[in-house]
Amino acid sequence: MIKKSLRRIALAAAFAFTIFSQAQAEVIEIDPLFEYPVAPEEIISLSDKSNWLIQHFWDKMDFKKKDAVNQSALNDAFRVYTLPMQWADKAEVDKAVDSMLAQLQKNPTLLLQFTKAAEESLYGQRAKIWIDEVYIKYLEAFLKNKKISDARKQRYRRQLNQIQNSMTGSIAPSFEFTTPTGNPGRFDPIGVFTIIEFGDPDCDDCRHAKLKMETDMKFTSLVDRGLVNVMFIIPDPVDGWQTKLGSYPSNWVVGGSDNVSDILDIRSTPSFYVIGKDGKIIAKNISVEQAKALAFQQETAQ
């Protein structure tokens, strides 16, 4: 018990130092919107410190201010704000975000800026963490605000549609594709554990991922025995893509899809989706190593 308590204290201290040091490091380049708060020392546990920061981070922010704030400074503040979401209670995060958005609805200028900051910290390529459930709250609040033009909403409406179609734990949507021979194909959850790689044959990381799968004897055994179904799909393929798939294993399903990027949330190249036998999305936008690890877990569970 003593070791566990010391470990919690060490984690909490490390967490507080991380938040503080990251904020201080950025001050050199960006004037902060306000002084970032630090959780009281008497709060010991990591989750309690995180909850406190989520609740009080924006106490010094003037949400009634009509003028735009410095977007870079807001992005920095929002990034620091989202870090404790990893350890905070979900109910506390939901309550804090809902309270913030209620204030932002009255200020469309700030709502737009906060939505951009949320995209940067919770959705974009440079985000430290991806939290779809939280980002969706900002998207929905932004899209329902009648004072914001429809032109500004289009890209966020597309993002919301993609994310909602592919939430972890939900049934994977179907999509159509074309095989290298020109035959039509269609992905439907098929009752088999499935790994889908969305990538580009010319992408170095995609070639490395292919190599890591086809040279792993344990993994290829799962595929050969029909325990794992592997697909390689090129989103929005360009002319000549068919000739680039000749070297892919014959027991993989390969093809190109003109519409899958409109349906699914694909944020990187390559991007891996893992679909369970029940058709539900187990994980998305993960690495090849993570996808393989989930496949090995599947074998152990059988």
Image (spheres, rainbow, N blue to C red):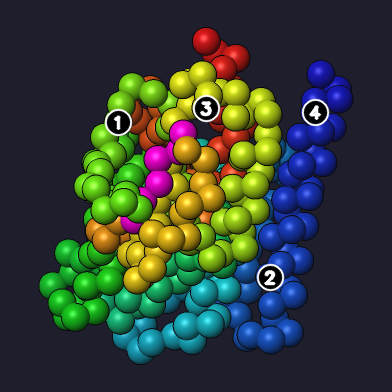
Residue type at the position of mark 1: Pro
The residue that disc 1 covers is 189
Structural crowding at the residue carrying mark 3, measured as other residues with C-alpha within 10 Å and reported as few (<14), some (14–19) or many (≥20): many
The relative height of residue 218 versus residue 14 in the rendered view (above or below) is: above
* Residue 293 seen in the current view: yes
Q: Pointer 3 and pointer 1: residues touching (CB < 8 Å)?
A: no
User: Identity of the amino acid at label 2?
Assistant: Ala
Closest to the observer: 158 or 77? 158
**In this figure, which residue is indicated by the disc labeled 2?**
23
SS class, disc 1: loop
In this rendering, would 6 be left or right of 199?
right
Report the magenta residues as a range.
Answer: 251-256
Relative image position of residue 201 (x, y in whole percent): 51, 60
- Is 66 magenta? The answer is no
Instruction: Please identify the quarter of the rendering in which residue 139 is found.
Output: bottom left
Direction from residue 135 to residue 9 in the image, left or right: right
Q: Which residue is mark 3?
A: 223
Q: Of marks 3 and 4, which one's residue comes earlier in the chain?
A: 4
Foreground of the two, 297 or 79: 297
Q: Residue at x 52, y 74 (%)?
A: 75
Q: Which residue has dot 4 on it?
A: 5
Front of the two marks 3 and 4 = 3
Q: Secondary structure at mark 2?
A: helix
Quarter of image, res 65: bottom left
Q: Amino acid at mark 3?
A: Val
- Asked whether disc 2 touches disc 4, contact meaning CB atoms under 8 Å apart, the reply is no
Within 10 Å of the Cα at label 2, are there few (<14), some (14-19), or many (20+) other Cα atoms?
Answer: many
Spatial CA distance of label 3 from label 1 is 16 Å
